[in-house]
Image (cartoon, grey):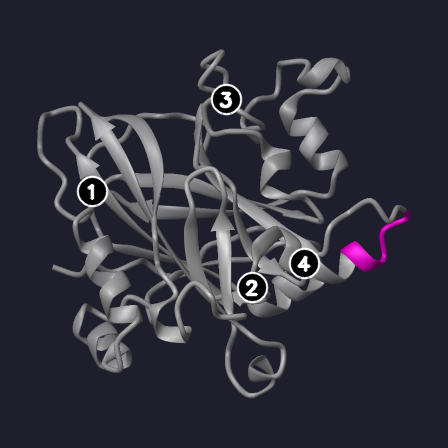
Amino acid sequence: MCINSAWGGRGFYVGIAMWPGGSVESWGSGINADTAVPGLNPCNATNNYNNTGLSDADYLDSKGVVVASFELTVDMLMAMSINSSDIDRLFDSISNAPTSSQHEVISAVVFRGGFRSEAVYIRSEDAYLSQGIGRVQSLALSAAFDKGQLTYLLWDDVTCNSCGGLASKQCITTSTSQPQHSCAATDEACLTEECSLTVYMGFTGDDRNGVVFQTGTQIHRINQYAVSSFYNTIVQQVSNVLKNAQQGFVGDVPVTDSGTGDAAK
């Protein structure tokens, strides 16, 4: 996870780091526009974060941040899934914390090497921070490369069209620096349906041999399908992306991967 290069068809490791009680602002920017210095990154194990005497990695660990890791296939449309039970366990750790300074949210970043996405909310009971409340079930991300070197990880706005638009109480503003939105499931709905988080990921740019990646544009298609009444049918037609999703486990269970993600050609 802590290297930047990739080439077509090879294993590509990324991490999803989740911060129970941490706001998106707590992560800092993906890249600080003033200093060109990135915000907190789990791969940074040698710096002195904010003069705390701790590296980014150690500071995040002290805050209870956990990581799910995934091995993806380059230039295949991938789906990374995290069980709702794991997210519930993280959220419960907020109320069990010895300090009340934490927010009732879980924020997350996707990272690889020196690059990470902007932080987003994946669960919130704090409408002041996220507008809507609930559990985010779908996010989409593009990984951009130049000659096999990762250049950025950029969220694609899932939108809240399927749950009443931006004014809906189910519409979470997942990111504030570059506003992104996603519909959220309520606790009541999750009693009868699966509320795991799925992060779709596509690839843009080219590998070190100049072969152009094709799947980045399909991220936009996934978002369109996710807000249509034909969502389940479409997902089946694009090679059962969800069925073949990479599954991450967090907390007391070792982080593992199962299966191989499939492509949507």
- Magenta stretch: give its range: 94-98
**Residue 208 shown in magenta:** no
Q: Which residue is mark 4?
A: 126
Look at the numbered disc 4 and give the secondary structure of its residue: loop
Residue 180: assigned label: none
Q: Residue furthest front?
A: 167
Q: Amino acid at mark 2?
A: Gly
Horizontal side of residue 147 vs 56, given as left or right: left
Q: In the picture shown, does residue 193 fall above or below 156?
A: below
Does the rendering let one see residue 254? no
Q: Main secondary structure of the magenta part?
A: loop
Look at the numbered disc 1 and give the secondary structure of its residue: loop
Q: Which residue is mark 1?
A: 9
> Are the residues at dot 1 and dot 3 in contact (C-beta closer than 8 Å)?
no
> Are the residues at dot 2 and dot 4 in contact (C-beta closer than 8 Å)?
no
Residue ID at (46%, 55%): 257
Q: In the picture shown, does residue 57 fall above or below 89?
A: above
> Are the residues at dot 4 and dot 1 in contact (C-beta closer than 8 Å)?
no
